[in-house]
Image (spheres, grey):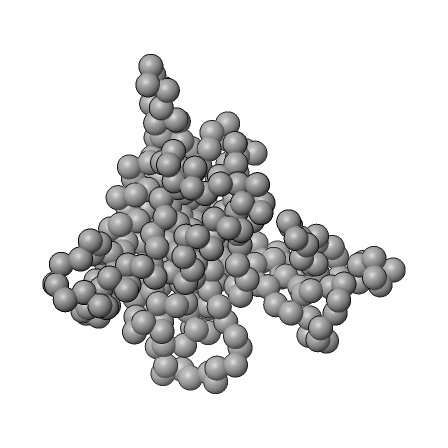
Amino acid sequence: MDKSYFTMFSLNPWHHYLTSLCRSETPARNSRCKVCFLGLVQSFSHYNAVGQRLGVSLVQAKEKGQLIFFEGLKESLSVLISQESNTKSQAIDFLRDPSVGLRSLYEFVRCTVSSSSGGGEKGADGAEEWGPPVLLVDDLSVLLSLGVTVGTVLDFSHYCRATVCSQLQGNMVMLTRCDGEEEADDGDDEGSERLHRGLTHQCSLTLHVQGLPTGYCRDIHGQVEVCWRRRQGDGQHTQKKLFQYKVHDKGASFFARGTSSAVL
């Protein structure tokens, strides 16, 4: 990709995206991306197990310094059960004092991606040369259940985008969950629908994944709506496409609606 992108996934995990970043080279650049991954809902062992099935070792990526993984579950536990005021990481100090917001978590992201910008220098030590950084967050909507307001989460996303995409010419991918079961409430700052709308406004590419409206199907597992937002001239052009998909053991197949082999 010649430009920086902010991509939002809705409803569905994206282990395939993570493992593709940790492979030998990115298609558009002759260097590997350095990845900062905020894992807020799953342990590192979970992602590593999925990665191994796809032929990628996230353990090796961490050892090489390519992957910086923030394990939110472990860090949260250390804050909630710690008897001391100081913990190993201050990135989630909002659990202790909600008034501080997500400033410390942003500083963790900024320091991580800034230290990777420019990559390792080529020399006698054989250091890697990294491409522009990539920030992954799984999943952003869990912060709402921890007492963080929608406005604070959107501010965090905005500052991360300014640093990663604008300043360092990197990319961001964030996952949110929107069940569609919550009643709309214009005065409710904690609604996932409001977060979803705010992130949709910020990002340049949205993938909304959901089950089939008609119910379960053995040969078609769901559908994904892809929405691109591009600037053209003085305005902004939005393009949408709808695909159906089927999940396999080591991947997934996508096809236009109504073109599945089970239908034809």
In the picture, measured across the screen, residue 208 lies left or right of residue 162, that is right
In the picture, measured across the screen, residue 196 lies left or right of residue 110, that is right
Identity of the residue drawn at 84% across and 63% down:
263
Total labels drawn: 0
Instruction: Pinpoint residue 251: horizontal percent, then vertical percent.
Output: 64, 50
Identity of the residue drawn at 49% across and 57% down:
8
Q: Of 242 and 233, which appears nearest the observer? A: 242
Specify the farthest residue to the left: 85
- Judge whether residue 214 can be spotted in this image: yes
Instruction: Pinpoint residue 95: horizontal percent, then vertical percent.
Output: 24, 68
Q: Of 144 and 161, which appears nearest the observer? A: 144
User: For the C terminus, which image quadrant?
Assistant: bottom right
- Judge whether residue 170 can be spotted in this image: no
Quick check: 128 above or below 66?
above
Instruction: Pinpoint residue 79: horizontal percent, then vertical percent.
Output: 22, 64
Instruction: Pinpoint residue 126: horizontal percent, then vertical percent.
Output: 37, 20
Q: Of 124 and 103, which appears nearest the observer? A: 124
Identity of the residue drawn at 59% across and 64% down:
209
Identity of the residue drawn at 41% across and 52% down:
44
Specify the farthest residue to the right: 264
Which quadrant of the view contains residue 219? bottom right
Which quadrant of the view contains residue 119? top left
